[in-house]
Image: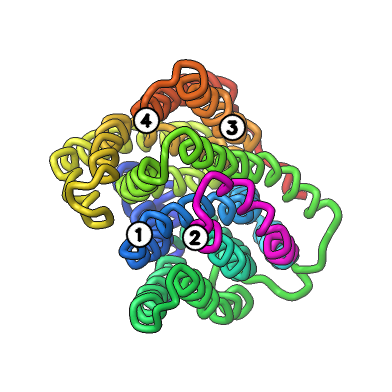
Amino acid sequence: MIIMEVLDRKKKLILEDANLYKSIIILATPVFLSNLLRSIHSFVDMYFIAPLGENAISSVQLTNPIIQIGIALAMGLMIAGVAIMSQAIGAKNTKAAKSAGGQLLTLCIIGGILLNIILYLIAPWLVGAVASDGTQETYDYALDYVRIRAFELIPTFTFFAFHATRQSSGDTVTPVIFNIISMVINIILTGYFVKSLGLGVAGAAVATVIGNTITMPFYLLMMFKDKKADISIDFKDMKLDANQTKKLINLSIPSALGQAFTSLGFLILNSMILTSYSETTLSAFSIGNNINSLVLMPAMGIGGIIATFVGQNIGAKNPDRARESMRKAMIMVIVFMAIGGLALMPFRDFLGSIFLEKGSAALSLSVEYMFFLFTSLPLMGVFQVFMGTFQGAGYTKSSMLLATLRLWGMRVPMVMLFTRVFNLDSSCIWYAMVISNFGGTILGVILYKFVRFDRTIDLR
């Protein structure tokens, strides 16, 4: 009874509550915490391996995008699932929501197994391609890290399926609980494996895999046994249906490609930075990005939950509320990110020194980089809301276009121009980041003009 009352209250927040600011904050906060905890996994690895030196830091920075390319497919499937299931719930079509949830889980299991095998086998080639200008030690660290974390893909894929079923119904709390458990286990094991057992970068990777895997049986059980949830699937829902599978794949491909292109773009950027400058610059870039990702989490939480607000209200045939949700979210992220950037600006040296040696060239570069990152935080927040809006409305091609053009149409070409043609110093990378964020905002505004909030996804 209590669970049903909570779910009903969340539906009212999404579909009826007059104070959209309050509704968005209440439901976005758990999403923000979930994203934060997921990012802390990478932070934990970075914190414990930093004492091993710049080669270890560079190896993680170089290879994280490789892992993210694999995860991109899971993210694409999750986004498609949230779009379909949230609109089905808004339309009170429980059968369609359950069917989509079952199909999503099956596709995630298949995708996770296949990518695990593929990534493990091609890891030497991938690492050799991105770390060719690094030291042998960097290559060895990176290869160990990628091959071990390849086994993380199966539990990660299935968790995204679980997360999609919960987020689409407004339950943003349960995924956070599992992320907290996973994070605590990861922190304890990483400290033990790296510091006590001396397993180095490989130990950090093993701890991350165990932390993500240990909760898997429990959330899978919830997907089937929690009959009080809006979406509780049965084994029959997992049987692939041609129409449902096609619908999920068609919606997920643009999002997955957008995510994959983004990760590939950072892979190229990392390689270009290592080739044009040094591992010192790459370490500064890595630390700056990790710190910035934490600061950006509130905006990512709001952008994530806006997909649910937009999707459910479109399904309930309330386009005005869907549109107003997006506008309120946009105001919130601009204010929050402006305040966050200004508040953290004086503490850049302290934040960087948590991971980098005081007085080092890498710390100096990271402090400079964080100035540009914190200055452009509102632009990055706007980008997150546009992405959530497009995904919730079923315009996954628009989200792919926005993500891809911001990186591949602006950022990567500018870095190539600045480094290869004009031979500028490493500060040019920071300039390219800010300019591309500004350009992405303009592109988001243009694409938003084509969004129709009265168009629903075919749920048959």
Of labels 1 and 4, earlier in sequence is 1
Please give the label number shown on residue 71.
none
Q: Residue at x 49, y 60 (%)?
A: 137
Which of these two is toward me, 439 or 366?
366
Q: Which amino acid type is shown beneath numbered disc 3? A: Thr
Q: Is residue 31 visible?
A: no
> Label 1: how many residues lie within 10 Å, few (<14), some (14-19) or many (20+)?
few
Q: Which residues are the magenta region? A: 114-141
Name the residue beneath numbered marker 3: 404
Of labels 1 and 2, earlier in sequence is 1
Mark 4 → mark 3, Cα distance in angstroms: 23 Å
Of labels 4 and 2, earlier in sequence is 2
Name the residue beneath numbered marker 4: 426
Q: Which amino acid type is shown beneath numbered disc 2? A: Glu
Which is more foreground, mark 3 or mark 1? 1
Q: How is the image coloured?
A: rainbow
Please give the label number shown on residue 53.
1
> Label 4: how many residues lie within 10 Å, few (<14), some (14-19) or many (20+)?
many
SS at circle 1:
loop
Q: Which amino acid type is shown beneath numbered disc 4? A: Ser
Mark 1 → mark 2, Cα distance in angstroms: 11 Å
Which is more foreground, mark 4 or mark 3? 4
In the rendered view, would you say 458 is above or below 168? above
Do the numbered discs 3 and 1 sit on residues whose CB atoms are within 8 Å?
no
Q: Position of residue 182 (x, y in %)?
A: 43, 73
Name the residue beneath numbered marker 2: 137
